[in-house]
Image: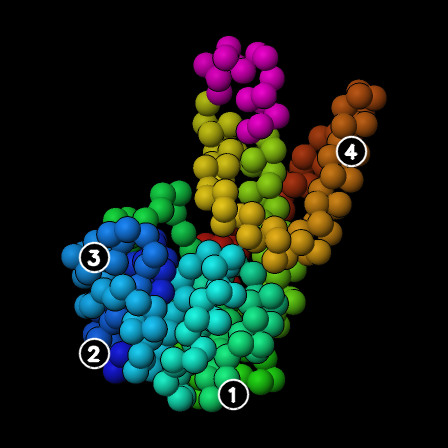
Amino acid sequence: MFNRVTIIGLGLIGGSIGLALRREKMAKQIAGYDLGQGVSERARKIGAIDDAYESVADAVSGSELVILATPVGAVRTLLQAIAPVLTQGTVVTDVSSTKSQVISWAEEFLPPTISFVGGHPMAGKEVSGVEVADPDLFKDCIYCLTPTTRTRSTAVSKVAALVETLGARVRFLEPAEHDGLVAGVSHLPFLVSTTLMSTVADDPTWGDAALLASSGFRDTTRLAAGNPEMYRDICLTNSAAIVRWLDTYVAKLSDLRDQIAMHDRNIDEDFTKAQQQRQQWQVTQQSGK
């Protein structure tokens, strides 16, 4: 059990962590801080935190574990703000979608007496805000941890215990490896979704086409409803990996375009291959491996 945990950023992820910690009785006290007007108080009312603070310094004071549950763009400033006031031995972790840049900031700004463990839960919802926080949000999901050679083993153990409390499964990755993988399976899908949405909606025929758009279009463009600022920060902090995946994707689209233009009757071979790949992935997902 943790004596005092502080959650900075009380949206869907931060709020869900707080609710899970409370339900599992894994923290004697949960402190919370959020810049949004009234957010901390709403988090307190739903039971995600015990105490709401107006100062980030007061929020982290005396905490054994500090969780940065903000968009990645806010992490640099937060690390600078909390570094001078953290208690010696405190463990800091985050939930950001990119890791290499965040770890670089942590190693730059946090004192040697503070341990940082990079984290990224592969979980979420289409909706956001503490009002939709769910203690079961992380159940059976992969939760990436990206310790480095500078990370104390005791700190890793504490964050791994947090992950276990959330009901998630730990996967240890190198920071750069993590960023390369999520660029393909998380960041690229968002960019594909937004590009599809704008391609069709920017066309003069959209008014009529929108009436015909059904579940396929809805499902494929679902990610376009995501937080624009969050994905902006992701692109800024993981640009090299994202560009590599985009280059591959654009090349495949170009090949597909040429096949369609040339009326290539073997085009279904690519469709069959993709169908089989997705079926195999679904089996893997269902087996939990």
Query: Which numbered dot is residue 112?
Result: 1
Q: Is residue 153 magenta?
A: no
The answer to whether 104 appears left or right of 46 in the picture is: right
Distance between the alpha carbons at the discs numbered 1 and 3: 33 Å
Q: Which residue is mark 2?
A: 28
Distance between the alpha carbons at the discs numbered 1 and 4: 50 Å
Residue drawn where x is 71% and y is 30% of the image: 268
Q: Earlier in the sequence, mark 2 or mark 1?
A: 2
Residue 66, compared with residue 202, is above or below; it is: below
Residue drawn where x is 39% and y is 81% of the image: 86
Most prominent secondary structure in the magenta stretch?
helix
Dot 1 falls on a residue whose secondary structure is: loop
Q: Nearer the viewer, residue 66 or 143?
A: 66
Residue 98, image x, y percentages: 56, 61
Dot 4 falls on a residue whose secondary structure is: helix
Residue 84, compared with residue 180, is above or below; it is: below
Magenta span of residues: 197-213
Q: Can you tell which of label 4 and label 3 is closer to the viewer? A: 3
Quarter of the image where one finds residue 261: top right
Quarter of the image where one finds residue 58: bottom left
Estimate how packed mark 1 is, as few (under 14), some (14 to 19) or many (20 or more) residues with alpha carbons within 10 Å: few
Dot 2 falls on a residue whose secondary structure is: strand
Tag 2: amino acid: Lys
Circles 1 and 3: CB distance less than 8 Å? no
Quadrant occupied by the N terminus:
bottom left
Q: Earlier in the sequence, mark 1 or mark 3?
A: 3
Q: Earlier in the sequence, mark 2 or mark 4?
A: 2
Query: Which numbered dot is residue 41?
Result: 3
Q: Which residue is mark 4?
A: 254
